[in-house]
């Protein structure tokens, strides 16, 4: 018997080594990638708190901050640690996310193998999770650190729960609670985890019994067991809604009626299934179709979902893994399905990071069951599994290549989607950062053509026109941006620059000041305010502005140079 366990342990160790090595090889190229211009600035590159690294003051800020529409203190601390270790070298930030993904792969294998005893099925699920192209966004996008980090604690919670089930007690339950709370502190996505633990009671843990008679007797006790986990869920849910409301990320019901949101959710559920089987045309942003969602899409997706559900119900007694996998997929997608719409996307690849695990369980255990019932020789399933893994590895490397910089990312998004105003705008911003003004202006115009009420595109177009010397046109688009959104700090800052260049200094000063009222740590507005103050010979105030810039961004060369000149002049 001891020889048997030793062989199993050796196989498990070999599987872990292979999974980790393969994942690292496939994702190694991200060490050469840049930050991208969608949210990486908010989370890292332009976030003064994060750039300062780990300080007691910043830890306190992370614990109470509701910035970028989330309460996510653990994620903030993770980004701060990266800045402490690597500064603003993107390689370190990217590779840390890859390391977390590798740990998730290993944990997923370990938890499944521990629950089921099915080593090779557990290994294949982990391999699918490791290498599926839909998961590239979660790993290659620095902003999505919250996704890989929260999933780490999701899987640790599952592992702790297995330990509790096998040896119940308040100490082991407290470990489950601790891991769960830490996961919620990384991302609220874990609110569905208590329900997943209940699914695991059904299969593979078998705590709900083997027949329908035992289910009503055991279910109430197991539901009651999960009640304490709902306390942090409730608290985090309240914080999430408050944060998103403050950030203006929750559209009104009038903007997106219930019918539109339900239709888009149904289509999204179907599209995730399609992209799992055929992972092509993946993009960083899928525009929400609004009321233009096609009826036949909704009908087709609904037919597929109902058909699978009926099949799962039919096989519920003989193939319990189908029930667990399908409900895992359906349930864990609910918070990000768009029923409560956050942002302007229809769906997102990153939202499938955890839900796909349920589908992988269905596919893997289903394939094993078919192979067994067909009495296939072992080499056939093995060959098929290796082929699938190799294809996914190649597709993942291809998808990874689109994340190397902002231009590649959004050019691919434009190829993969239609009427993508955000892709045009961010591609324009990438060209603007490289001073390719004609390309930037073209893409901003395209963004406005698709979404005339997109304030940031108007503002950025004003910036590009201003840099090209077309001040009257720049003034028009900068004013239009503020007509659409009077509280957009970037628009106030950009309009201030145009007014300054036209010699209207007092008006420029008002707009820089207003930008700082809206966003008190907005470095460009402080810098430009200092320039205006210096031009008006208000030297003391200008010096204070440049000092504030350096306080927020110690590497700001322009502020350091101007401060030195003003100090010498005094």
Image (tube, grey):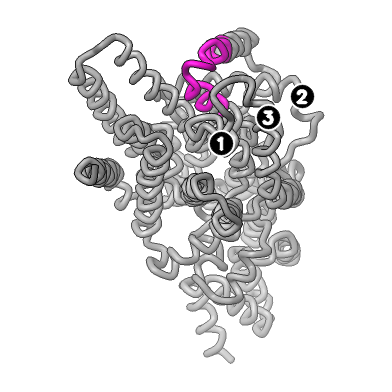
SS at circle 2: helix
* Depth order, front residue of 68/542: 68
Please indicate whether residue 438 sits to the left or right of residue 105 in the image. Answer: right
Point 32% across, 11% down: residue: 373
| Residue 326 belongs to magenta span | yes
Q: Where 553 sits versus 221, above or below? A: below
Distance CA(mark 2)–CA(mark 1): 24 Å
The dominant secondary structure in magenta is: helix
Distance CA(mark 3)–CA(mark 2): 38 Å
- Image mark count: 3
Q: Which residue is mark 3?
A: 217
* Residues packed near mark 1 inside 10 Å, few (<14), some (14 to 19) or many (20 plus): many
Please indicate whether residue 499 sits to the left or right of residue 368 in the image. Answer: right
Q: Are marks 3 and 2 in contact (CB under 8 Å)?
A: no
Q: Which residue is mark 1?
A: 422
**Residue 255 seen in the figure:** yes
Q: Where 249 sits versus 122, above or below? A: below
Which residues lie in the magenta part? 307-327
Task: Indicate which disc, 3 or 2, sits on the residue closer to the N terminus.
Answer: 3
Q: Position of residue 311 (x, y in %)?
A: 53, 11
* Residues packed near mark 3 inside 10 Å, few (<14), some (14 to 19) or many (20 plus): few
SS at circle 1: helix
Please identify, in this view, whether the residue under mark 3 or under mark 2 is nearer the observer: 3
Task: Indicate which disc, 1 or 3, sits on the residue closer to the N terminus.
Answer: 3
Point 55% across, 60% down: residue: 76
The quarter holding residue 169 reads bottom right
Q: Position of residue 427 (x, y in %)?
A: 47, 40
Q: Which residue is mark 2?
A: 258
């Amino acid at each position: 018997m001891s020889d048997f366990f030793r062989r199993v342990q050796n196989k498990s160790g070999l599987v872990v080594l292979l999974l980790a090595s393969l994942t690292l090889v496939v994702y190694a190229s991200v060490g050469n990638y840049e930050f991208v211009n969608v949210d990486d600035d908010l989370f890292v590159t332009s976030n003064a708190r994060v750039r300062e690294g780990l300080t007691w003051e910043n830890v306190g800020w992370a614990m109470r901050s509701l910035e970028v529409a989330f309460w996510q203190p653990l994620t903030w601390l993770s980004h701060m640690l990266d800045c402490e270790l690597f500064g603003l070298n993107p390689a370190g930030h990217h590779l840390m996310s890859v390391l977390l993904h590798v740990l998730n792969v290993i944990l997923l294998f370990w938890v499944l193998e521990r629950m089921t005893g099915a080593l090779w099925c557990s290994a294949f699920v982990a391999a699918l999770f490791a290498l599926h192209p839909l998961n590239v966004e979660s790993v290659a996008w620095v902003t999505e650190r919250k996704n890989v980090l929260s999933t780490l604690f999701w899987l640790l919670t599952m592992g702790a729960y297995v330990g509790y089930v096998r040896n119940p007690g308040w100490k082991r339950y407290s470990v489950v609670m601790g891991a769960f709370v830490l996961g919620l502190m990384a991302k609220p996505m874990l609110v569905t985890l208590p329900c997943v633990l209940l699914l695991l009671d059904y299969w593979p843990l078998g705590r709900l019994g083997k027949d329908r008679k035992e289910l009503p007797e055991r279910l109430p006790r197991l539901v009651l067991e999960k009640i304490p986990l709902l306390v942090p869920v409730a608290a985090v849910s309240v914080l999430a809604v408050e944060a998103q409301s403050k950030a203006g990320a929750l559209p009104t019901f009038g903007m997106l009626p219930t019918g539109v949101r339900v239709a888009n959710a149904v289509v999204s559920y179907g599209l995730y299934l399609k992209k799992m089987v055929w992972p092509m045309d993946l993009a960083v942003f899928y525009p929400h179709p609004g009321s233009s969602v096609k009826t036949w899409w909704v009908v087709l997706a609904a037919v597929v979902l109902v058909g699978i559900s009926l099949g799962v119900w039919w096989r519920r007694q003989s193939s319990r893994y189908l029930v667990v996998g399908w409900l895992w997929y359906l349930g864990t997608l609910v918070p990000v399905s768009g029923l409560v719409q956050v942002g302007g996307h229809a769906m997102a690849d990153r939202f499938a990071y955890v839900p796909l695990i349920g589908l992988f369980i269905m596919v893997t255990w289903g394939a094993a069951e078919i192979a067994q019932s067909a009495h296939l020789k072992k080499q056939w399933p093995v060959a098929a599994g290796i082929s699938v893994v190799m294809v996914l590895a190649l597709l993942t490397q291809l998808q990874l290549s689109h994340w190397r910089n902002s231009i590649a990312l959004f050019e691919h998004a434009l190829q993969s989607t239609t009427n993508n105003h955000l892709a045009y705008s961010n591609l324009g911003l990438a060209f603007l950062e490289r001073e390719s003004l004609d390309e930037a202006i073209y893409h901003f115009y395209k963004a406005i053509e698709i979404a005339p009420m997109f304030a940031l595109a108007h503002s950025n177009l004003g910036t590009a026109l201003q840099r090209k010397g077309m001040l009257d046109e720049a003034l028009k688009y900068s004013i239009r941006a503020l007509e659409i959104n009077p509280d957009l700090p970037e628009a106030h800052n950009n309009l201030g620059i145009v007014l300054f260049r036209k010699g209207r200094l007092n008006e420029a000063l008002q707009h820089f000041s207003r930008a700082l009222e809206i966003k008190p740590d907005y470095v460009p507005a402080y810098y430009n305010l200092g320039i205006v103050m210096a031009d008006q010979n208000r030297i003391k105030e200008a010096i204070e502005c440049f000092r504030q810039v350096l306080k927020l961004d110690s590497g700001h060369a322009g502020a350091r140079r101007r401060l030195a000149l003003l100090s010498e002049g005094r």
